[in-house]
Amino acid sequence: MRTHKILLFCLLSFVLVSACKKDNKLVSNQDFFPAVLIDFYVNLDLPLYNDLNFPNGYVYEKGQGYKQRGVILYNTGFIGPDQYVAFDRSCPYKVDSTCSIVSVDSSTLYYRCGQYTGAGGKFSPCCNSKFVASNGSQYEGLADRPLKQYFVTIIGRQLHITNTPQ
């Protein structure tokens, strides 16, 4: 009887591990490009970051993230530790493509793979993937995983953004 339980446990473990894999590679929001060091602060009292004081407000922190494409800081409108989120601007679909940069949509409710260009703010799409602004999950397009998320710690009127939990 004990042998049957061990075999059943092994079989269930194999099935669960197999369900978490895709193309023999563990799927997570961290495996689609090499780790980068993220460790910076944002002072919410500075005019540059004023939009973060309002629900659905966002800023791009340039020179951060993968290939230094930037990090999107976003106010979810929630109260507490989930009020602010940070995502890398590199789209998980063909992450090394030069056009594979994520921008906040004009509705500010989701992110799109592509960029707004020119004086009129015309959107130039890349892979047409869309992601939910509050959590980075993919819901449309070719990307098959969420955006790479960074950790945000609220310290008074400052945000500390890192790639490791604090």
Image (spheres, rainbow, N blue to C red):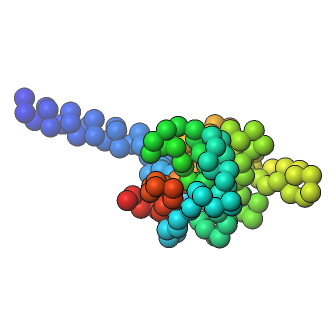
> Is 32 above or below relative to 146?
below
Residue at horizontal 72 percent and vertical 52 percent from the top: 103
- The image shows residue 94 at horizontal and vertical percentages of 67, 57
Q: Nearer the viewer, residue 61 or 69?
A: 61
> Is 153 above or below relative to 14?
below
Q: Nearer the viewer, residue 38 or 33?
A: 38
- The image shows residue 18 at horizontal and vertical percentages of 39, 42
Residue at horizontal 72 percent and vertical 63 percent from the top: 97
Q: Nearer the viewer, residue 42 or 25?
A: 42
State the image quarter where residue 119 is shown.
Answer: bottom right
Determine if residue 31 is in view.
no
Q: Residue furthest front?
A: 45
Residue at horizontal 46 percent and vertical 55 percent from the top: 156
Quadrant location, the N terminus: top left
- The image shows residue 124 at horizontal and vertical percentages of 84, 52
Q: Residue furthest left?
A: 1
- The image shows residue 38 at horizontal and vertical percentages of 51, 67
Position of 1 with respect to 79 (left or right) is left
Quadrant location, the C terminus: bottom left
> Is 45 above or below relative to 13?
below
> Is 98 above or below relative to 17?
below
State the image quarter where residue 11 is shown.
Answer: top left
Q: Residue furthest top?
A: 1
